[in-house]
Each structure stands twice: as structure tokens, then as C-alpha cells.
Image (spheres, rainbow, N blue to C red):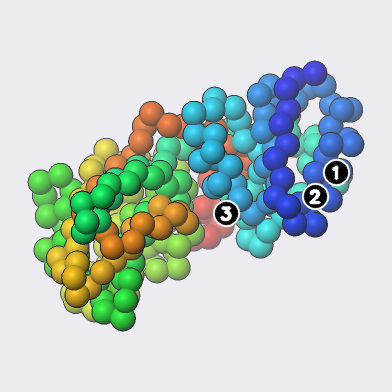
Amino acid sequence: MNKITIISDTNKKSLRIKSFISKNIKKYQFLKSNLIIVIGGDGFMLKVLKKNKNSTKSFYGINSGNYGFLMNKFSPKHTIKNFSKAKMISISPLEMIVKNKKGQNKKFIAINEVSILRQSRQAASLLIKTGAKTIIKKLISDGVLVSTPAGSTAYNLSVHGPILSLHSKKLSISPISPFRPRRWKGKIISDKSIVKIRNLNPQKRPISAVADNLEFRNAKNILIKTDKKIKFNLLYDSNRSLQKKLKLNK
């Protein structure tokens, strides 16, 4: 039998699904090799992917959380059969390199988005560039998002950012509650772009840099780019692909 790994969240629903899969999976000898079955919600899937960022295995998510955008729906009748029919989508994460006001550096990856968020009651004051080109000289807002296509229907959509096709080779820069310029709606850029964000007033207006759900506080300079060296192979049921999920949310 091909090598199958099951990784489950610890809540009761996830453990029940894990028990069912473990008992019934032996019936099927045609499963894809090097398969990791992840049982949980989107947050748990993101955690598992990051822990296995150097893996060449394929990941099939089974939702036991709320929305489960990155996951497949669990069905006692069809889930195990669906493993062999699942379609694969390969996605690359963002790499975020951030320096705080003390000069300390941290590096994170983000599969959905990098969020730059105000850290106090004061709005953030941000300069945003791509390479040497200035996107906006001074954005006064609650923050800004840089989103991948896979993450474009997550936090990005809730701040009225655009939905990106998985094959678009684009990233979305979306403001969060912009105060000045109030009418700036953001920008779609190439996934080859290097985004540079600078806090224009780190003493009075501190900000946090968040890669999916990992936060680095008191950020001063943030560099964001697509890490093409990392590719996550995600499996989706043929009638419920990630591309179709993107369309359903338009």
C-alpha cells in the first residue's frame, strides 16, 4: 500500500473523522502515493503546510472547522473514494522579511496573505513601493494586505479586495479602512514584484506585520515577495476544486 499520513486537529469532530478514515482507508489500494490527509479547519491546514514546507507530498484537507476554504467536505460515502480522483493545484507562498524598530529581523512565509496592521489606537502611516516604483507615498489606514490568489477570498475579500484567479500570476495589495487617500482601492501587481512597506512614524504609530496568523510587532520595514522555491501541492475533489471555490465567491 502507498504511504499515507493522517494529521488531525484535536477537537472531537476531527478525531471522529480521523477514526473513520483510519478504519476504512485500507480497503483502497489505489490511493496516490505520498499523500498527507489533513483533518481540521483552514488555520490547522496552514499550520501543517508550514511545518512541511520542504515536502514534495500532496495534501488533501478534510474540513472539520467552520468555512474550510482550503479544505474538502467530509462525506462518509464519498471521501475515501475521492482521494484517487482529486485534482492537484500547486501554490507558492509569500515570504515576509520584517525589521522592527530595534533592528531585529524575522522571516516568515504566508500562504494566504501578509497583513500590516495598526498596533494602537493611532492609524498606520505607510509608504508602499514595488521595487523602485512608489505605489503610494502615504497611506493613512488601519493597515494593508498583500494577498496571494489562494488567499484572495479570505481576509482580502472581507476588506473588499479583488478575487484573483489561481493562474493569474498576480498579487493583490488592498488597504484596510483607508482614511487618506480615502478613495484608494489598492492595486493588483505581478507575483514577480517585490513589495516594500515602510512605517513612516514607528514611534507614534506602531504597526504589526502578520504572516497568515504569525505576528511580529513594532515593525518598521517589511519586504514581501513570492517564494517560488516552495510549492504546496493541494488536492481537491474534482467537483469542488479551489478554482471553483474562487468562482463561487465572486
Q: Quadrant of residue 239?
A: top right
Left or right relative to 108: residue 213: right
Q: CA distance from mark 2 to mark 3?
A: 16 Å
Left or right relative to 223: residue 149: right
Mark 1–mark 2 contact, CB under 8 Å? yes
In what element is the residue under mark 3?
helix
Dot 3 corresponds to which residue?
43
Query: What amino acid type is highlighted by mark number 1?
Result: Ser
Q: Residue furthest top?
A: 1
- In this view, the residue in front, 70 or 244, is 70
Dot 2 corresponds to which residue?
15
Q: Quadrant of residue 183?
A: bottom left
Query: What amino acid type is highlighted by mark number 2?
Result: Leu
Residue at 40%, 44% in the rendered image = 109
Residue 31 seen by the camera: yes
Q: Residue furthest bottom?
A: 121
Where residue 154 appears, as percent x and y from the top left, is 49, 59
Dot 1 corresponds to which residue?
19
Where residue 110 appears, as percent x and y from the top left, is 42, 47
Q: Residues within 10 Å of mark 3 (few under 14, many from 20)?
A: few
- In this view, the residue in front, 249 or 124, is 124
In what element is the residue under mark 2?
helix
Q: CA distance from mark 3 to mark 1?
A: 21 Å
